[in-house]
Amino acid sequence: MIVCGIETSCDETSVAIYDSKQNKFYSLVSSQVDIHSKFGGVVPEIASRNHALNVMPLFLDVLKMAGLTKEDINLIGVTKSPGLIGALFVGVSFAKGLAFGLKKPLVGVNHLFAHIVSAEIENDVKPPYLGVVISGGHTHIYLVDECYNLKLLSKTIDDAVGETFDKIAKFAGLPYPGGPFIEELAKSGDETAVLLPIGLKGEADFSFSGLKTHVINTITSNKFKLEDVAASFQRVVVDTLALKIDHALKRTGVDVIVVSGGVACNNYIRENLPKKLDRNCYFPSKKLCTDNGDMVAYAAYLLYRKRKFLSKFESALDVDEY
Ligand code: KG4
Ligand code: ZN
């Protein structure tokens, strides 16, 4: 099957082709980071306009890369939510037009589901597992069962972990998005220098706003080197993630963990989270941690196969046929 995946939920436009027979991906991403960094964050209207400019050229280029024509496509997948409404609208409209014109099925994909299953693309891992999404907008732990049904076990009640990285970085005068800059700074810091709190310690859900305020107050106090604050912050992020994941492991009895989303690019987290948990975690490669069309194409393929299987039992999934 040849699957086309389209991702426009935030500030990356990405189109990918997944050839399921060969298990090969062809993918292109057009990042708007340089445009939005001038504003210190994503400007939704600018993001939508750039998606509208980028999506068609990317689609044509990725087809060329794969040596295919649009008629070769068997299935189209597109991120339908969550995300910036105008940005999603561009991808969904493009995908609907494509599906209508080619008379091919279209699958609307949940962005978080795509992030979770992205860990399967390069790793030999299949559900049941815990799907931990750590991104700019989300900090969620899901139980993913054998049939790819998702059960939400933990979520943040305030800031997402990536948002916390970005807000602290902004306060420290670092560029947007701040995550990679905090990581760089922390490399030369002492992670035991600053004592920082873990939010909602005894509960399943996450809270990062107290940690964020504590870090900002510590920076304002000028008592510690910025490198030490950054390193201590990252250590508490890992401690927090490990605590909640451990709780979810005990609750579900599942012992396989996949960790994905933009913050999963962080090397300190990639190295130290498995150590802290004393078990392996499956991470996608870094290029698949940030937003990409590959994960959307792969997720659409999984959902379509599931729908084909379930249709025998008259179950309705979110699939539109044209
Ligand atoms: O998944 P993603 O590309 O977009 C969303 O769906 O949110 O994640 C973007 C987030 C930003 O908050 C960014 O600062 C964070 O991922 N991020 C990092 C690193 N690289 C990206 N956070 C910590 N360390 C990094 N190396
Ligand atoms: Zn994302």
Image: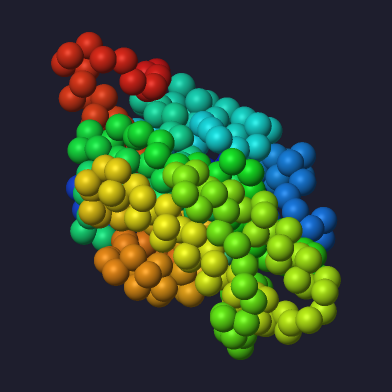
Q: Nearer the viewer, residue 273 or 69?
A: 273
The reply, left or right, for residue 126 in relation to residue 17 is left
Q: Give how far across and how far down residue 98 sits, in percent.
A: 48, 30
Is residue 224 visible to the viewer in this orientation of the structure?
yes
The residue shown at (46%, 22%) is 100
The reply, left or right, for residue 84 in relation to residue 141 is right
The reply, left or right, for residue 226 in relation to residue 125 is right
Quick one: quadrant of the C terminus? top left
Q: Nearer the viewer, residue 47 or 25?
A: 47
Q: Give how far across and how far down residue 219 sits, in percent.
A: 78, 72
- Residue at the far top: name it: 314
The residue shown at (30%, 32%) is 149
The residue shown at (57%, 28%) is 93
Q: Is residue 48 above or below residue 65?
A: above
Q: Give how far across and how far down residue 131 sits, in percent.
A: 36, 48
The tally of labels here is 0
The residue shown at (21%, 58%) is 124
Is residue 297 visible to the viewer in this orientation of the structure?
no
- Residue at the far front: name it: 202
Q: Give how far across and how far down residue 261 sits, in percent.
A: 48, 54
Quick one: quadrant of the N terminus? top left
Q: Is residue 197 above or below residue 313?
A: below
- For residue 217, what is the image quadrant? bottom right
